[in-house]
Image (tube, coloured by chain):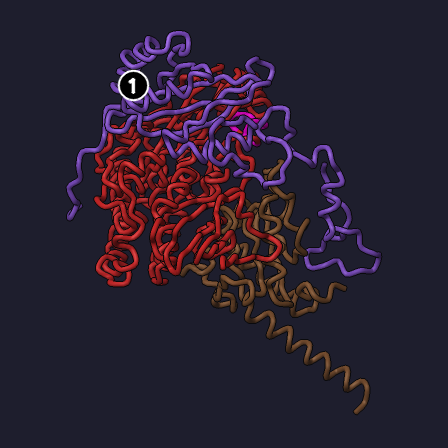
Chain colours: A purple, B red, C brown
């Protein structure tokens, strides 16, 4: 095509960068935090390490100082029958170098607290709020740990495995009935309405 | 006196939002029902005169529970709900998810399926950027751009309808390949539709590029530096507008993108105008990828030849008992995926969309965590809005291109 | 004048008013999710709602009389949608566009209201995930018919 502008070369070579992380950075990280960091078997995609919750802040700072300047994602996982039950998963990326590293922080059910990393990466601020909202894992030192996706008065943390998929509707039939005022049964002889809906409670559960 | 704008019974809780309405400042609530928020974003603004002092985005108005719902469905069914996360680019969600599951399974898709996936994902990128361009044009004050864009987008949606039967949510990619092969004559139709793209984009650029209103509203507005963008986790065109040439398609090639020749457009200043330029140029790059894909489309199957994953063809089901059993098992139960966890990042029109998929070895995902690019982009908006005029908020929100299905999931 | 004549006269006015109501419906831009993108296509060159008097999409509820609820309605959005509906002047009609707005669709979960009719009186349900713009045009035309026949009173005279 004509008129195509010249652009700088895009960052490339992710596979070598991941090999570098696996061979150089992860051993160095393990040596710097003996006992606090356990390399896990490199999974299908990228190197990963397990980090003890009490060492997370120091590990995160160590990694940030060595070039991991983007926090790609913070997510939670609930492995219900297992102990420790929860896991907070951080995906890190170093941008010109294209290094990637996954930190997996196991969280005990009775502790439910990990230190925040939002002072290092501001991106973590919203993502940690989401983990708190959906899993109920607190982030110590977070500036504003409130619900983000669910309404403020919501009870429970929906993405936990013991939270019913239908939420309050599962246990409270009244919840639906209260809202269902436009489905009130109609009297015989009432016009059926434009949709031909005769009224009455909704089917299904 | 601090003035607080109340909105009916849906009041602001200023304390919780950490806004102290002091001095000559005013707190203004924009959204969630507002034409310029591109969905259901609510922004609480603290303004001093016309200047924005602080902006707090509030999200969650479209929280759909997609991640929870996906845990209840089997691996194939989950495609349906995951597609509805980023509704401007459902095929990007679809591709990222099936690639993640294929990594867990260790499946290699046939070449025809791989190339078709690239073709459809790039068509989707064009369609998504066209919606962005049209609605941004509408927000900035150019309604004819909306008409031009939507007209062009229709011809791409026609291709989806032709191939998959649905316009908006094709859900066309399956674990192991595609749901079905493209119909006869599709390639010719695709060539004809694609031929309209560069011409129409040139028309639109003739309207906008030198337009004084367009330049005044966008140039130098909503700037963000590369360092800040990286710190806030901004990806995609918004990051590339700051001059960072990071594109997942180049950095960690997936689905055979390394075979294609395309450039990664970048901007310089990271302002709204650069984001516009980057997206428009990306449409042309996607067009070039589509043309290449059509040129090299090989013949062959579009699904792996593995009866544990792919459904047997219908004529086999009628004749062979074993095929019938496989068919029944796949339809009623699905397939098991080896235990493990995988993170698959792909370049969606909004940035790096990642799928962190955890399998427990069963026929249902244990956890599908979607890394939403728009989520992080939205929370970088306060940085862009800092010190801007109130009217610039509209330009900033539009230029960031948030899609709330994906932000809230 | 005779009573019958009076009645005859009154019905004609009613018919005239209904005709006026149905012929210039101004929809509200209430985009929620996927369906909103298809709703935007209504004004696009191919579908062109203008031919049915519905091209003026209003962003403020004060000027709109048709709410096309396009997409899934989450629990967090319920107070907002109720308020927006209250702000619309009477008479007003509601179209539930898509499976999610009609019944919750594939999202039978904690976050989504199972059909927008749990909070608003819906006149027309449009099936599909998402419905094509043709389907929405058809639904709006059906609503026009219903208004003309006096079946849809627009939230005021619920017989």
- Indicate left or right for C5 with B182 as reference: right
- Indicate left or right for B229 with A127 as reference: left
* Subunit bearing disc 1: A
Magenta segment boundaries in residue numbering: B69-76
Residue lying furthest bottom: C1
Query: Which residue sits at x=32%, y=21%?
Result: A63
Query: Which residue sits at x=67%, y=76%?
Result: C15
- The part of the image, by quadrant, that contains residue B225 is top left
> Element under label 1?
helix
User: In the rendered image, which residue does mark 1 sit on?
Assistant: A18
Measured as percent of width and height from the top left, residue B149 is found at 35, 55
- Residue B214 vs A105, above or below: the answer is below
> Does residue A98 belong to the magenta stretch?
no
Q: Let me know if residue B355 appears in the view.
A: no
> Does residue B71 belong to the magenta stretch?
yes
Measured as percent of width and height from the top left, residue C7 is found at 77, 82
Quadrant for the N terminus of chain C, please: bottom right
Which is nearer the eye, B308 or B42?
B42
Which is nearer the eye, C86 or B114?
C86
- Indicate left or right for A73 with B200 as reference: right
Quadrant for the C terminus of chain C, please: bottom right
Which is nearer the eye, C47 or B23?
B23
């Amino acid at each position: 095509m004509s008129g195509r502008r010249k652009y700088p070369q895009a960052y490339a070579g992710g596979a070598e960068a991941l090999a570098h992380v696996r061979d150089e950075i992860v051993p160095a990280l393990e040596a710097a935090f003996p006992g606090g960091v356990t390399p896990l078997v490199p999974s299908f995609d990228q190197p990963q390490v397990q980090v003890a919750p009490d060492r997370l802040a120091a590990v995160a700072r160590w990694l940030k100082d060595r070039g991991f300047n983007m926090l790609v994602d913070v997510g939670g996982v609930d492995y219900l029958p297992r102990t420790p039950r929860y896991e907070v998963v951080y995906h890190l990326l170093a941008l010109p170098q294209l290094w990637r590293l996954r930190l997996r922080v196991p969280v005990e059910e009775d502790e439910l607290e990990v230190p925040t990393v939002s002072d290092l990466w501001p991106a973590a601020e919203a993502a940690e709020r989401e983990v708190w909202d959906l899993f109920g894992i607190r982030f110590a030192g977070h500036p504003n740990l409130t619900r983000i996706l669910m309404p403020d008065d919501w009870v429970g943390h929906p993405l936990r495995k013991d939270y019913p998929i239908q939420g309050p509707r599962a246990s409270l039939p009244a919840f639906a009935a209260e809202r269902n005022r436009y489905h009130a049964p109609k009297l015989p002889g009432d016009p059926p309405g434009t949709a031909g809906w005769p009224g009455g409670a909704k089917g299904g559960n | 006196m601090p003035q607080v704008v109340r909105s009916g019974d849906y009041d602001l809780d200023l304390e919780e939002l950490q806004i102290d309405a002091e001095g000559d400042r005013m707190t203004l609530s924009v959204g969630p029902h507002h034409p310029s928020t591109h969905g259901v974003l609510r922004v609480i603004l603290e303004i001093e005169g016309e200047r924005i002092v602080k902006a707090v985005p509030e999200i969650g108005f479209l929280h759909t529970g997609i991640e929870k719902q996906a845990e209840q469905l089997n691996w194939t069914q989950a495609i349906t709900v995951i597609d509805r996360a980023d509704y401007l680019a459902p095929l990007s969600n679809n591709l990222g998810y099936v690639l993640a599951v294929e990594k867990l399974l260790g499946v290699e898709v046939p070449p025809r399926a791989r190339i078709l996936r690239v073709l459809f994902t790039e068509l989707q990128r064009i369609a998504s950027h066209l919606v962005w361009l049209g609605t941004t044009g509408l927000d900035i004050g150019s309604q004819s751009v909306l008409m031009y864009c939507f007209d062009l987008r229709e011809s791409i949606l026609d291709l989806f309808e032709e191939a998959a039967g649905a316009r908006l949510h094709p859900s066309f990619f399956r674990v192991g390949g595609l749901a079905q092969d493209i119909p006869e004559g599709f390639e010719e139709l695709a060539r004809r539709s694609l031929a309209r793209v560069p011409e129409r984009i040139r028309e639109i650029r003739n309207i906008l590029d030198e337009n004084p209103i367009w330049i005044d509203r966008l140039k130098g507005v909503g700037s963000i530096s590369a360092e800040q963008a990286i710190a806030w986790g901004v990806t995609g065109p918004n990051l590339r507008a700051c001059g960072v040439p990071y594109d997942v398609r180049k950095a960690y090639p997936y689905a055979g993108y390394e075979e294609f020749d395309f450039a990664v457009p970048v901007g310089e200043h990271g302002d709204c105008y650069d984001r516009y330029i980057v997206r428009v140029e990306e449409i042309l790059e996607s067009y070039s990828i589509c043309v290449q894909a059509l040129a090299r489309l090989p013949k062959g199957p579009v699904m792996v030849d593995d009866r544990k994953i792919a459904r047997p063809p219908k004529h086999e089901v009628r004749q062979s008992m074993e095929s019938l059993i496989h068919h029944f098992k796949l339809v009623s139960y699905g397939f098991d995926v080896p235990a493990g966890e995988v993170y698959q990042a792909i370049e969606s029109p909004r940035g790096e969309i990642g799928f962190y998929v955890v399998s427990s070895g069963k026929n249902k995902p244990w956890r599908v965590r979607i890394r939403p690019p728009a989520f992080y982009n939205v929370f970088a908006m306060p940085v862009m809005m800092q010190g801007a005029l109130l009217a610039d908020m509209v330009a900033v929100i539009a230029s960031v291109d948030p899609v709330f299905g994906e932000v809230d999931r | 004048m005779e009573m019958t004549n009076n009645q005859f006269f009154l019905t004609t006015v009613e018919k005239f008013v209904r005709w006026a109501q149905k012929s210039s419906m101004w929809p509200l831009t209430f985009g929620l999710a996927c369906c909103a993108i298809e709703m935007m296509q209504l004004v696009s060159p191919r579908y062109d709602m203008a031919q049915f008097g519905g091209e003026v999409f209003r962003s403020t509820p004060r000027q709109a009389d048709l709410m096309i609820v396009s997409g899934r309605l989450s629990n967090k959005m319920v107070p907002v949608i109720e308020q927006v509906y209250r702000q619309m002047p009477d008479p007003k009609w509601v179209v539930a566009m898509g499976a999610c707005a009609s019944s919750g669709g594939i999202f039978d979960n904690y976050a989504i209201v199972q059909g927008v009719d749990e909070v608003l009186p819906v006149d027309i349900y449009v099936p599909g995930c998402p419905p094509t713009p043709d389907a929405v045009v058809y639904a709006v035309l059906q609503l026009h018919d219903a208004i003309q026949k006096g079946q849809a009173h627009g939230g005021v005279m619920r017989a």
